[in-house]
């Protein structure tokens, strides 16, 4: 819906951030931003799990 509006107004959007419910991979919140809003946030490196 927001993407359609953005394209009709002459700009594009990109996914900025996803938030998940604790201890699950279920998405709680998804944030979008204007594609010209600067660089993406740098994510910290994730720890590798080795069995």
Image (cartoon, rainbow, N blue to C red):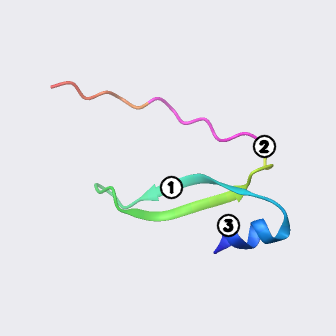
**At 51% from the left edge and 32% from the top edge, which residue is drawn?**
44
Distance between mark 3 and mark 1 Cα atoms: 16 Å
Q: Position of residue 3 (x, y in %)?
A: 67, 67
**Element type where label 3 sits in the image:** helix
Left or right of residue 38: residue 27:
left
**Element type where label 2 sits in the image:** loop
Distance between mark 2 and mark 1 Cα atoms: 18 Å
**Predominant SS of the magenta segment:** loop
Left or right of residue 31: residue 47:
left
The residue lying toward the viewer, choosing from 19 and 2, is 2
Residue position for label 1: 18
Say the numbered circle drawn on residue 3. Answer: 3
Q: Earlier in the sequence, mark 3 or mark 1?
A: 3
Would you place residue 48 above or below residue 9 in this image? above
Residue position for label 2: 38
In which quarter of the view is residue 51 placed? top left
Q: Quadrant of the N terminus?
A: bottom right
The residue lying toward the viewer, choosing from 27 and 23, is 27
Circle 3 packing at 10 Å, graded few (<14), some (14-19), many (20+), is some
Circle 2 packing at 10 Å, graded few (<14), some (14-19), many (20+), is few
Asked if the residue under mark 3 is in contact with the one under mark 2, i.e. CB atoms within 8 Å, the reply is no
Q: Position of residue 2 (x, y in %)?
A: 67, 71
- Residue range highlighted in magenta: 38-45
**At 75% from the left edge and 51% from the top edge, which residue is drawn?**
35
Residue 40 belongs to magenta span: yes
**Element type where label 1 sits in the image:** strand
């Amino acid at each position: 819906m927001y993407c359609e509006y953005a394209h009709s107004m002459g700009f594009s959007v990109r996914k900025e951030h996803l938030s998940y419910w604790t201890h699950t991979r279920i998405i709680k919140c998804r944030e979008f931003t204007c594609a010209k809003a600067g660089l993406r946030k740098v994510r910290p490196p994730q720890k590798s799990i080795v069995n």
